[in-house]
Amino acid sequence: MKSRTAKAALAGGALMTLMLVAQRAVPGDWPENGNGPGSERYSLLTQITPANIHELGVAWVYDVGSSGRSYQATPLVVNSVMYVTTPAEQVLALNADSGEMNWQYDPHETRVRVNRGVSYWPGDATHAPRIVLATSGDGRLIELDAKSGTPVSSFGNGGSVVVRASLAPASNSGSYGFTSPPAIYKDLIILAPDLQEGPSHGLPGTVSAFDAITGTLAWRFYLTAQPGTPGGDSWGPGGTVNRSGPAAWDGITVDRQRGLVFVNTANPADSYYGADRPGDNLYANSLVVLDAATGKLRWYYQTVHHDTTDTDMAGPPVLIPGAGPGNVPAVATISKQALLFILNRNSGKPVFGAEEKPVQSSDVPGEHSSPTQPFPVLPPPLAIQSATVADVTRVTPESEAYCRQQFAGYKNYGPYTPFMMEPTVKFPSSIGGPNWGGMSLDPALGYLFINASDLGNKGQMFPSDKMPKRSFGRGARGGGRNREGGRGSGGNMDQGVGDGGAPREAMPYRNPDVGQRFVDNNGYPGQQPPWGTLSAVDVHSGQIAWQVPLGEYPELTKLGVKATGTPNIGGSMVTASGLVFIGATPDGDFRAFDAKTGQQLWQAPLYGYGLATPMTYRGADGKQYVAIVTGGPGSLGGVHREVANAPNRIIVFALGAHGNDAVAEPAPEAAQPAAQAPAPAGAVTAVSLPPGPGRDLVAQACSQCHALTTVTSQHMNQQAWQGTIENMIGRGAQLTDAQVTSVAQYLAAHFGPH
């Protein structure tokens, strides 16, 4: 006979189990960043349909209390509670039906970069569910009780783990943080950092797994292939020693059935100079597949060899139940070159085949360009790969003449054109093609949905001792709209002071023109439209099922120039009722498309930039909701249109709601700078910085990795400038807290909203 104490313990255990089950995800929730572990961004909800979507309106809006900052988080919803980060990386738990706050947690970071949300660990028989935050500024892994928001004291040191502290001390310098939420596999939290991409040396790129209960390190895999391991000879003699990166800033995908982790990696450091890393540089620019339990390498597929064009992978890998003629289990991965590889999930072999094709070599002295790059046989490229003078824009006679004059001074040698010792224009730009928004999948229809930009950027490599003056920016300003959204530091930073006062590494050659977009006199892309698209790829045939322009410039539409599409940043999600939802465009609208045909069915203003991936869920009231966060232009800043002081908000839609008026009217559109004649290729254009406190610091710090026109073409408030500067620090810039404040104050005073 069991004792009364034992019976009580059993009863208590049963009660605990019931409580835990009540907090677990239920059908209609969105419990992971990609909804499923395969990053499909697919929902089975069908209440909102193509037939009734015209009834969709704003149900509620939550203002997070900031404005102008890039906001890229995808909310989670579990058991009618929404968990989401703010641009300041605070974690909010809101009533998913009403937007009322349950709790808020502030990690108190000194500097914050970009954060795309949190993860949810469902707990087990003895541990309650937890919210997992990986911080972007200081690289901490934090666990919070999902019900109360208090740190879990038994995890790590009082609720957090400083991940960089577990790295080798010799490598412990430079920025280190996480921009995407971790993956969850059983009782493991799996994550990889975003790191500087220039100069060459700094913190290593790794994939790490931590115990979800205790916070102890379970395993670690180094993304720079080490000597004696497969690919260890792909960096040249000594090329791996203290090498920074490669980063893995995309979300991580998990195949729970096979026990596999899929990781997309970024380009090697330095972004544009690779003479100190001869070889293919594994596992940069690759899909790396690891055993989820042990971290052992299963297979890899490299999409770019010896990258010198900042062609990172774009978005999380997506698991496909069956692809190709044999309907084999597959995984899709895409790079910023807009080449989509659909690979056999077990072997890593391209389902539709791939071939190595010759590409242009760099003329930078000492460079070791790969003579070929891999191209999938199918699908075809999803964005522009090259252009000639015949392809320049014809939006107006003035813009055509302007861009012809520009193009005459720049060389393009087709896909993977490196920045040369002569003025060069490459397509797609380092913003992509696709970017971090990645893809979504309708597994029933067999369509992958990918949004991409058609935009070029200009550049030229210089010896570091023969650089143009750093108070100048090269090339045409294009009405001042030239800001580039690539992640590289330009790699090639000037000699300066690094951590602890040590001299910073100076690369022998550098590209000072990171940020110079190929645009016309009004800031529109310099080649013919479309300038942005949404595509559906049939995973069974490898063909493009449909492709439509994504976004518009209303002022051009009024002039009769329609369906241009726009550059775009953000992602899509798809529902079982056949709807693809996406924001992502600088016109600030939220759209829904017919998944089968690509027909646009619905459009609503956000009065801000919806540069995040939307999600959908069923509330406790039985309604289906659709949510997206909004904020500043981020990497789209400078693509002609700009809304000053766009508020950072969570906007939630539902059928029958008529709350569009609840979304406040936008702040006045920033005035567009007067158009200027294009400067000859290779010339310099003076940039005038107004006098005032912080001017000299801006001239020094903000020209170390890009032209000053990249800075002076922007118009943001102090909050937005602060966020931009903190993001640059994460990419390798060096500023103290006091200097960050001084630079942000100066830029807001002189380059604030009009």
Image: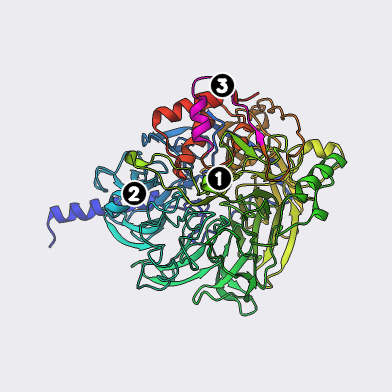
Horizontal side of residue 403 vs 437, given as left or right:
right
Q: Residue at x 42, y 35 (%)?
A: 735
- Quick one: quadrant of the C terminus? top right
**Residue 545 drawn at (x, y percent):** 73, 64
In the picture of the structure, the residue carrying the numbered disc 1 is: 466
Q: Secondary structure at mark 2?
A: helix
Residue 284 vs 733, above or below: the answer is below
Contact between labelled residues 3 and 2, with CB atoms less than 8 Å apart: no
Total marks in image: 3
Q: Amino acid at mark 3?
A: Ala
* Residue 687 falls inside the magenta stretch: yes
Q: Residue at x 13, y 52 (%)?
A: 5
Contact between labelled residues 1 and 2, with CB atoms less than 8 Å apart: no
Q: Is residue 85 visible?
A: no
Q: Is residue 616 visible?
A: yes
**Residue 412 drawn at (x, y percent):** 71, 57
**Residue 14 drawn at (x, y percent):** 28, 54
Q: Nearer the viewer, residue 470 or 415?
A: 470
Q: Secondary structure at mark 3?
A: helix
Horizontal side of residue 751 vs 741, given as left or right:
right
Task: Find residue 749 and name its label.
Answer: 3
Q: Which residues are magenta?
A: 685-703
Q: Nearer the viewer, residue 84 or 157?
A: 157
Label 3 vs 1, first from the N-terminus: 1
Q: Residue furthest bottom?
A: 326
Horizontal side of residue 420 vs 509, given as left or right:
right
- Quick one: quadrant of the N terminus? bottom left
Q: Amino acid at mark 1?
A: Lys
Q: CA distance from mark 2 to mark 3?
A: 53 Å
Residue 485 vs 279, above or below: the answer is above
Report the mark closest to the observer, 2 or 3. 3
